[in-house]
Image (cartoon, rainbow, N blue to C red):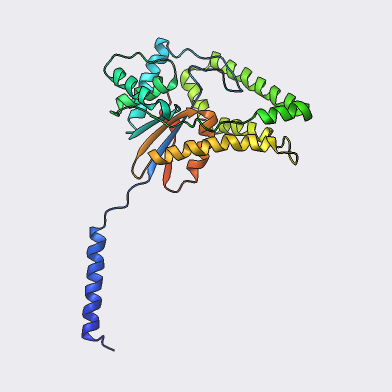
Amino acid sequence: MRMPLLLGTALTAALAALSVAALAAPPTPEPARVMMLGMFHFANPGRDMVKSGVVDVTTPAHQAYLDGLAGRLAGFAPTAVLAECSPGDQARYDAQFEDYAAGRFDLPTNETYQIGFRVAKQAGLAGVTCFDEDEVGWDAQPMFDYMDAHDPQAREDINARFQALSAEQDREQASLSLAQLLQLASDPGRDAINKGLYLRTNAVGAGDGFSGADASASWWHRNFRMYANIQKAAGPGDRVIVLAGQGHTAILKDLLAVDDRRVAEDARAYLSEGD
């Protein structure tokens, strides 16, 4: 059966309009690429429960490595470098970066400067972006109080675990290269150990106030807020480097893995001294 002329003409016109619209539609932007670079603190303030000695990153050999690392990371062509610093201090970091770019500022030992400032300068950025969270932290004191009063075995267990990890990190700091230490700070196995510390105390006070679970939830709460700041910075087509302690990146990488608007770039490929 032949199609009526008017109907056929209308269908042809509609198909032509769809074809023109398809040709005119802008291409779908690429998802943001986000590189999580786990860190140990170059200038350790001693606030972490797992404590270790601090490798001296100011030696000529380490400075040469950091210059090379910054060049490799700049090759990722980041549109932003996010650092574990307080957004309330952003203006101070901006002024310091301006001085650094002009050759008027010597980099302190903190990784925000030693890596973040170096990468931002080599990538042609205006500075680093602070993305830390100040208002929510690991609210663990009620859990420790509960252990002291009701579960001394749990307190002894977690203290022993902290001491063992601190001793292991001391050995690593004394024997491994800076590149090897950074590889460990981005290692999935170490990420699992880091997150496992919170599960180790999660059952403290179960059924009796849940102080252990609440302490764990507070740490994830802080990292959810930090990830929100990453999402804000990593829009379609952006390429973002995130520098943060491994206690954060271990969790932030889990969130990135299930974020359907962003994809992960493995930082470990950039860390090798031989590249």
86 in relation to 109, above or below: below
Residue drawn at the location 59% of the way across and 36% of the way down: 218
Q: Is residue 173 left or right of residue 16?
A: right
Q: Quadrant of residue 127?
A: top left
The structure residue drawn at horizontal position 26% and vertical position 67%, both measured from the top left corner, is: 18
Q: Is residue 182 visible?
A: yes
Residue 60 placement, left or right of 144? left
At a point 68% along the width and 24% down the height, the residue shown is 161
| Residue 60 place in picture, x, y as percent | 39, 10
Residue 12, how many percent across, how many down? 23, 75
Q: Nearer the viewer, residue 176 or 207?
A: 207
| Figure disc tally | 0
Depth check: give the residue in front, 101 or 19: 101
Is 77 displayed left or right of 249 in the figure? left
Question: Which residue appears at 22% of the width and 69% of the height?
Answer: 16
Q: Quadrant of the C terminus?
A: top left
Residue 98 location, x and y as percent?
29, 21
Q: Quadrant of residue 264?
A: top left
User: Which quadrant is the N terminus positioned in?
Assistant: bottom left
Residue 241 percent location from the top left of the image:
40, 33
Along the line of sight, which residue is nearer the eye, 46 or 76? Answer: 46
Q: Residue furthest bottom?
A: 1
Residue 34's place in the image compared with 29, above or below, is: above
Farthest residue toward the top? 59
Residue 275 seen in render: no
